[in-house]
Image: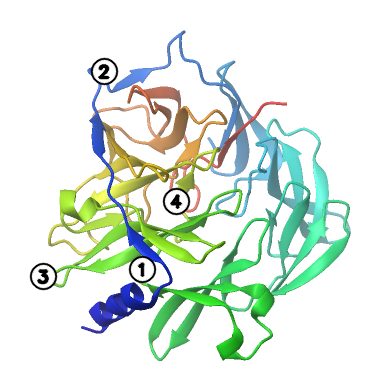
Amino acid sequence: MRRLLLLLILFCFAPNLTQAEGSLTEICPDITLQNRWEGFAGDGIILTTFDGYWMWTYDVKRNVRYALEGIPACGSNCHLSRDGMWITYLRVMRGDFIRTGYGKMRLDGSLRTLLVENVAEVEWWSDTALLVWDRNYAQAYLQSENGWRFETLDVRGITRVQPSGYWGLHIRAEGDVFYRSLLNLRTRNRPPEGQVRVEIGENIRYFNAGAWSSDGRRYAFIMPMMQADEHLSSEVFLFNPNDRSISQITQLTDEYGAIRINGLNPSELSWSPNNQKIAFWVLPLGDDSPEAPTQTAILHILDVITHDITRYCGYRAETHTPNPPKLRWSPDGVYIALGGNPPNDNRGALLMALHTETGVFHVLSAGLASTFGNTDVIAWGIKP
């Protein structure tokens, strides 16, 4: 009842809340999974790991892979630049004592450059500026790549900050319940009643994924939706920071019943390079708990402009809890790279690329290694 009341409050008082429906199309080619063939048109570089220790480069066009020795494999703390040319990485420096910092490099491992030392994480805030989080995630600052620090942000309770902007996802506790809101950080020094904030509901495990588009114009997030039988389902919503509007852009519960979108990782919604589409996994729940589902996860792509959805049946993820495979778009937005273990295949974890127009999953390489529990793709960017 408490969750249902919270959702009713959100729908009644969120500014400019709208709903929209789009079409659902399924793509199921005759050959759903095939080995890489001569006509495969992908390009660029995919970063992943084949040994579970170092980051590896996979040259898509040349079909060649090699380890970037000295660069540890990373999880969500490596960030691709907007132009797809650079990636941030954890840098370990050895001398009289071991120091850590963050650097940037090209995706082939060249031009390794130290950015900042002794911090928790470094992200791209704009084309020319970095968002640097201190070790306690209590303060962050904006800094140019040459080290000029030009603004400090109070990020206590903030988990994600708008690219090129000042909205942050704020998590707060009220008793034993956690709530999400989007807070304008430039109003944070005001009294609570003067802060500019938009509530987006309770923070519930497996129902709280969200991600900013790379241009900062939209924040996509999963909202838990209470059903008549008191099961929770998921839908995708968009927040527009310009007018503070919220719109529901999926009606997937009408198609599947109760579902879980993605997994435990709260930052895994994958925006396309042009910020028009989002890729994610849908996991039908039925009467299952979201922590112990029995069905497989299905890959979907949502067009945030038309609200049309494409469902792909060529590969379903059987390993999806706590998290399904990460989805990483190619620079041209045609392919999506992922790791996975197709049934009845004895080659180990495969590096695959879905052609989003044909629905064919191309096997690029075999032998992905597990890091942080999954055999995942780190990034897909442009070759220097």
Q: Amino acid at mark 2?
A: Ile
Distance from the alpha carbon under mark 1 to that under mark 4: 15 Å
Q: Amino acid at mark 4?
A: Leu
**Secondary structure beneath label 1:** loop
Q: Which mark is on residue 269? A: 4
Distance from the alpha carbon under mark 3 to that under mark 1: 19 Å
Number of marks in picture: 4
Q: Which quadrant, please, contains the N terminus?
A: bottom left
Along the polypeptide, which appears first: circle 1 or circle 4? 1
Q: Residue at x 22, y 17 (%)?
A: 30
Q: Is disc 3 in contact with disc 4, using a CB cutoff of under 8 Å? A: no
Vertical order, 295 against 197 (above or below):
above
Along the polypeptide, which appears first: circle 2 or circle 4? 2
* Residue count near mark 4 (Cα–Cα under 10 Å), binned few <14, some 14–19, many ≥20: many
Residue 180 locus on image (x, y percent): 45, 74
Along the polypeptide, which appears first: circle 3 or circle 1? 1
Q: Residue at x 53, y 31 (%)?
A: 330
Q: Nearer the viewer, mark 2 or mark 4?
A: 4
**Secondary structure beneath label 2:** loop
Q: Residue at x 60, y 86 (%)?
A: 194
Q: Is disc 1 in contact with disc 4, using a CB cutoff of under 8 Å? A: no
Vertical order, 94 against 344 (above or below):
below
- Front residue of this view, candidates 363 and 30: 30
* Residue count near mark 2 (Cα–Cα under 10 Å), binned few <14, some 14–19, many ≥20: few
Q: Is disc 2 in contact with disc 4, using a CB cutoff of under 8 Å? A: no
Q: Which residue is mark 2?
A: 31
**Secondary structure beneath label 3:** loop
Along the polypeptide, which appears first: circle 3 or circle 4? 3
Q: Which mark is on residue 229? A: 3
Q: Amino acid at mark 1?
A: Arg
Q: Quadrant of residue 121?
A: bottom right
